[in-house]
Amino acid sequence: MSFKQSCALSRFCFVCFADLCKTGRKYQMRYNQSTSLWTDNRTSPATHGPSYITCRFSSFSAMPDCETTNPYTLLEDDLKTCYSDIRHELRKNTQLDELFRIASYYFDGQGKALRPTVVLLMAGAINFHTNNEGLQYSQRRVAAISEMIHSASLIHDDVIDTADIRRGKPSANALWNPRQVTMAGDFILAVSSMMIARLKNDDITLILSKVVTDLIQGELMQLGTRETENERFAHYLNKTYRKTASLLANSAKAAAVLGQADGETAELAFQYGRDLGIAFQLIDDLLDFVSSSDALGKPTAADLKLGLATAPVLFASEEFPELNAMIVRRFKESGDVDRAFELVHSSQGLQQTRFLAKKHCDEAARLALSIRESPYQRGLVAVTNMVAKRLK
């Protein structure tokens, strides 16, 4: 796929076609980047929603085989420096030892480090693409900022969800007072905001500020649900973009902008992060049904217990309509969680979720292949494979 063909996807990030088998009609579900909203072109309610969805992102042939590299090996020293820099920034901005201990709790290098990895890979790939060498200081700062925003959101999520486990160890709010933990999350965001300000780049400030507004809106969207069956999947995808994909998309774009990329290249970086982020969350939602608690580092069926209907449930509801009533009441009645879990496993929901995630990963890989070849570019492709195949 050519560079121009990749960037031609910039207005609508993603196109879903659903074959409505009873009526023979088809509709398109589109994501408009300017409004951050999913819409479809149906003129009347559909009898079938998310089932039978296939994602035809483009008419291009399958992704060609290419030699990939291990991104974590490539960036081993850079990632160590990233976490060291984060802890240094937190330490120098407070004299309160307890606040520092809570705020730095998740910066032990034991997480997936997906956000800083993507930012550093995109920075290196774009710099090579534009005939610049190495990683810039400002791009490294964006990598740290992206991980700080992510970790602050995890801290707040754990307080909201009263989670006890995160990454296979006690969550912060299981060890400290939830009020203290909430303030520690706020502190991380405040320090990351100061780091953004020190970059003295208005474009980067606007790009990364959008992430925080998306995170807040995504969290509020997750607290609610749509009672109209035909709106649920669009609502879920909008929430997924805001809560997960926006950070990856905008951080990757920021790295490209700092690498002096032109508008089309910066847009390509955004699209890559968006598709990767949506795929990552789809796989995360799938693993909630198929992985053990030990493998995930958190309880299984956690989303159902929180009243959340994720992609596997929404797909399954097309085969088992009894799920619709459970979705509306947020699985609050006795037996709802167990029954929903059973129905998801009896349906094609898990397979359809993985298929959709794979399509997003394929699109992200195609976008990466439009960038000039380098170890960093191959790392970007490798990350898409890792996300598609991850088991925890």
Image (cartoon, rainbow, N blue to C red):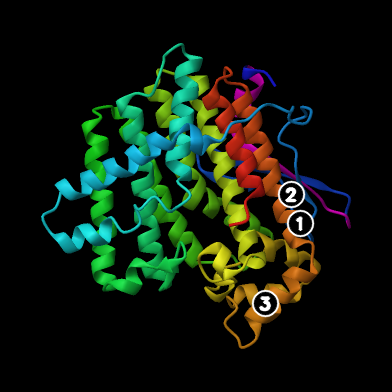
Q: Say what amino acid the circle numbered 2 marks.
A: Phe
Instruction: Give the quadrant of the C terminus.
Output: bottom right
Q: Which residues are magenta?
A: 4-22
User: Considering only vertical position in the picture, is 276 above or below 368?
Assistant: below
Quickly name the residue at label 3: 325
Whether residues under marks 2 and 1 lie with C-beta atoms below 8 angstroms apart, the answer is yes
In x, y percent, where is residue 324? 69, 72
State how far apart marks 1 and 3 are (Cα): 23 Å
> Tag 2, which secondary structure?
helix
> Tag 1, which secondary structure?
helix
Q: Is residue 263 magenta?
A: no
State how far apart marks 2 and 1 are (Cα): 6 Å
User: Considering only vertical position in the picture, is 41 above or below 308?
Assistant: above
For image coordinates 21% across by 57% down, the residue present is: 100
In x, y percent, where is residue 217? 43, 54
Q: Say what amino acid the circle numbered 1 marks.
A: Gln
Neighbor class of circle 2 (other Cα within 10 Å; few <14, some 14-19, many 20+) is some
Relative to the observer, which residue lies in front, 385 or 39? 385
In x, y percent, where is residue 102? 26, 62
Whether residue 310 can be seen here: no
Q: Say what amino acid the circle numbered 3 marks.
A: Ala
Instruction: Give the quadrant of the N terminus.
Output: top right
Please give left or right for residue 72 compared with residue 285 in the image. left
Relative to the observer, which residue lies in front, 233 or 369? 369
For image coordinates 38% across by 56% down, the residue present is: 153
Whether residue 151 can be seen here: yes
Quickly name the residue at label 1: 351
